[in-house]
Image: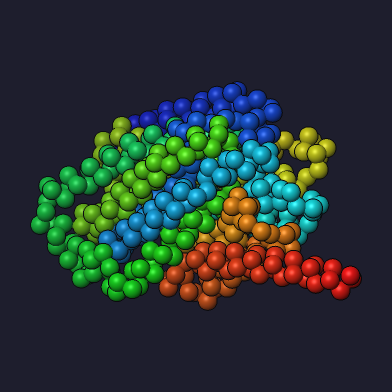
Amino acid sequence: MNTYWTLQSLSTFGLVLIATFLVAWKGHRDAKDEAEAHITKQRLNRWFIGLSAGATANSGFVVTGAVGLGYSYGLYWLLLPFGWAIGDLVFWQLFPHRITAYGHQANATTLRDIITHDLPIRRYHPLALASTAVVILCLGGYTMAQWVAGQKFLDGAFGLSGHSTLIICAALIIAYSSLGQFRGSVYVDTFQAGTRLLGTFVTLGTVFWCVIADPSTFTANIDLAGDGFLNLLGGGTLVSALGFIIGYAAAAIGFGLGQPQVTTRYLAARDPQETRTARWIYIGYVQLTWASMTLFGVLLRGVMPDLADPEKGMATFVAATLPPLLVGVIVADIFGAIASTANSLLVAMAQATRDLLRREQRSRCPLWWIILGEGVLTMLAAVMLDGRATVFGLAITSVSLMAAGLAPAVGIKVLRLVHTATSITVAVFVGFSSALIWNIYDMSGVINEAAIGIPLGFLANFVFSHRLKADRTTGRKIGN
């Protein structure tokens, strides 16, 4: 990899990065102060909702973790996006339009606003504190996954290793996230969805070309990967595959309900009908990019069989096979996949943190200050990991625990199920703690922890809300 090649690639990447900052700046200009403070006044159309939510949902996991799973374990991991698609279909049938309607009614800016709406509680009630703590803790872990993904893509594409690469990648994203805030985040995510689609077609097409050009070598390498590599069931049974699919379908439903960086897109929609029509834009984008990158990883195993770190596979492959101009475009695409999620995560974390402040304190603490501070903290935490965690591990654990903790509470509110402040508080604690215990005892391989925490959270609310009502009824009878 000579200096001229590297300069060409970096120049192309730099041009796309400049465009990203310009898009973020335009979002900042277009957002009125009132709309930035109250997301429900943003009035996004279906394309902004579907593409920005999809780009935010995809994350750096798609260009690192999904590739690594396909490369390491084969076609079995196509069941993950398949299970997720089933969950997304259920979720979009029941929830997004209701989140829009409920959010507009409650003038909600964050998940905490939805969860605490119409409940007789104060700012520092256990429910308010618990929901905010779950958001900050889990989004912090999810953001760290994006910084690790950024480090891996720079190492794979340009051979830049060490903590400095993580810091450079994180610093760039923190900078334009602070600039654009929420509206800029939506604009940038939509722009980066376009580069992700381009990158998907180019990389998948190129690896197919490599397979066709030398089929005998490809076949020999795949044979060395093991008997179950091209088996959709892997080394398991139909029952274990069904458990895997059901677990991740539940995680997808929980993800849709419990991820503030995504639900804010529904809160910001023009109206519930506009949200409904974004369904196929979102699902189509997520499935096309996710399944394609898993399949890319499977094919890459037959083209480059000796990668030390499969999560760097996409960046390593494009650097070895494509001309520098296209390498720069694909690197910009990989960066965009990471940045679109990290950007939205930082904004969502900052909004959740700002919820803890009183009105007069908020005026003295602009949102971009919080974005900057939390961005730096998560970056330092990722540096301290020092390569001891995978993108997949950090991302899926953070997403699943948040889903278990918050999805029942949000679902209870938007479905307008019977609840009290106490019952919904218990639901948050039961959902999160049961999922955490399931994860600690390493049971996630049997079924994802979100599939445990979410139903237990709903059940806890049902039991406690009806128990409290029964107690109040009994008390009235005794008093009489």
Q: Residue furthest front?
A: 480
Give the quadrant of the C terminus. Answer: bottom right
Residue extending furthest toward the right: 479
Left or right: 457 with respect to 187? right
- Residue 276 is left or right of residue 35, and the answer is left
Return the x and y of residue 203 as percentages of the image width and height.
28, 43
Q: Residue 211: give x, y in percent of width and height.
A: 16, 50
The extreme left residue here reads 216
Tell me what residue is drawn at x 58 percent, y 36 percent. 268
Most foreground residue, 354 or 40: 40
- Position of residue 423 relative to residue 40, above or below, is below
310 relative to 140 in the view: left or right: left
Residue, x 63% and y 56% (percent of image)? 417
Q: Which quadrant, please, contains the N terminus? A: top left
User: In front: 233, or 207?
Assistant: 233
Q: Is residue 400 above or below residue 272?
A: below
Please indicate whether residue 6 sits to the left or right of residue 173 in the image: left
118 or 65: which is nearer to us?
Answer: 118
Residue 401: image x %, image y %?
56, 62
Please name the residue shown 38% across and 53% down the image: 85
In front: 412, or 387? 412
